[in-house]
Structures are given as C-alpha cells and as structure tokens.
Image: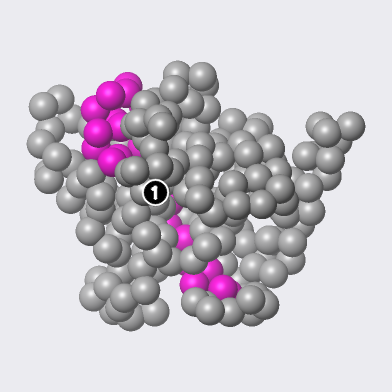
Amino acid sequence: MKALLIEAAASVIVLFARAVTAVRAIWAEEGLPTRPCIYFANHSSHGDFVLVWTVLPPRLRQQARPVAGAEYWLKSRLTRFIGSDVFNAVLIARERDNRIHDPIEQMAEAIDAGSSLILFPEGTRNQTDAPLLPFKSGIFHLITARSDTDLVPVWINNLNRVMPKGEIVPIPLICTVTFGNPLRIEPDEAKDAFLQRMQAALLALSPRPAGGGE
C-alpha cells in the first residue's frame, strides 16, 4: 500500500512540475549518463532539485537521490514522507551541532549503494546578480573520496522566475534543464583548481552571456 502511495505521489509531483514549467531537458552530446553519477547544478529556487529529478527518465530518476537539508524535510509527517519516501533524499543536517553523521560519509554511502546524487555546490540559493555563488568545498571532498564517480554539470534556467523568493503560488513559465558531458577529478588536482573548473563547466551551460543578468 505504501509503495503505491509513493508511486502516486511521485507521479503527481512530476505532472505538476511539468504543467507549471513545461520543462524540457537538453542532454549533452554524449547522451544520458550510463552509470551512477553526481549531478551538480546552480541553485536559485526551492524547486531546483525537483525540476532536475522530474526531467530524468524513469530509470535514472529512480536511481537519483537529491541531497537536501534534514531540518526542512523532517519537520512534519508530510515533508518527511515526500523527502524520505518519495524523493529518497540524502538528508543532511545543516547545523554542525545537530549532526549525528558526517555529510561526506552519507553521500559516499549513497554512491556506494549505486545511487546518483543531485547536489548544489553553492550551498544556498543564489539571490544575487552573479550567475553563481562561490562553490563550497563539499563537492571536492566527496569526489576525492569517490574519485571514480562522474560529475555531470546541470544548468537550470528560469525556475527562479517561476518561484520567486517569498512567493507561494508558482508563475507558469517555460524552464530548461541543460546537462553537460560527464567530468572527472584529475589526479592530484588541487581543491581551488577543481572548484574553478567545475564552476566554468556549469557556467558554460548557461544561456546568458558571461556577466549578464537574467
């Protein structure tokens, strides 16, 4: 019974996201990922991971686990059901004092179990005019621990206009989710060089000119 409820809820979320955003995926020249990977995307809306999750084909969607804040998704029975059961999210405690598990270990264990991850290296929603906030170091520490994992850049376009900060009702607009070719960390690549390379790969998928506003 619970499995049917989870499947029904997932279908409703996908249908709603597609109805509001008419979202379409733009895949890389190399096509769909062929193995578990880390999808890393720009972050400007609460709905970002929902849109990435929605455009993945069913096989890849079942394999993908968003990385999300435990404090939000565990605050009620409904959000716990959606976050833990429907999205099967890797729930990370944002506050260090509240952490029982190491976030890198949590994500690494999910990869070891055959899951892909959807994460946002900026760490928080970008509410500035800059195309990206500086990346946090978590993605570097994760890929250092699991260096044979592919990194797939993903640019989400227009969703910040669908769900502006402070708004409850979404504004219907067409969104795109653009996937880049998979990347790997280079042997002995330094943290700063790696983070800059990942930022450049993500910005290369953006439809707007460098330095331009949306």
> In the rendered image, which quarter contains the C terminus?
bottom left
Q: Circle 1 is placed at which residue position?
A: 94
Point 27% across, 73% down: residue = 130
The reply to whether residue 109 is in sight is yes
Task: Indicate the position of residue 50 as horizontal and vertical percent values.
Answer: 59, 54
Q: Farthest residue to the top: give it.
A: 112
Question: In which quadrant is the N terminus drawn?
Answer: top right
- Which element carries disc 1, helix, strand or loop? loop
Q: In the image, which residues are magenta?
A: 138-163
Above or below, 122 relative to 170:
above
Taking the view exactly as shown, the residue that stands out farthest to the right is: 1
Residue at x 12% of width, y 44% of height: 193
Along the line of sight, the residue nearer the viewer: 182 or 191: 191
- Residue 64: where, in percent of width, then height? 56, 36
Residue 94 versus residue 190: which sits nearer the camera?
94
Extreme-front residue of the structure: 97
In reply to whether residue 162 is colored magenta, the answer given is yes
Horizontal and vertical percent position of residue 169: 67, 77
Q: Relative to residue 171, is residue 178 depicted above or below?
A: above
The correct choice, above or below, for 44 with respect to 185 in the image is below
Q: Residue 132 falls in which quadrant of the image?
A: bottom left
Q: Position of residue 112 (x, y in %)?
A: 45, 19
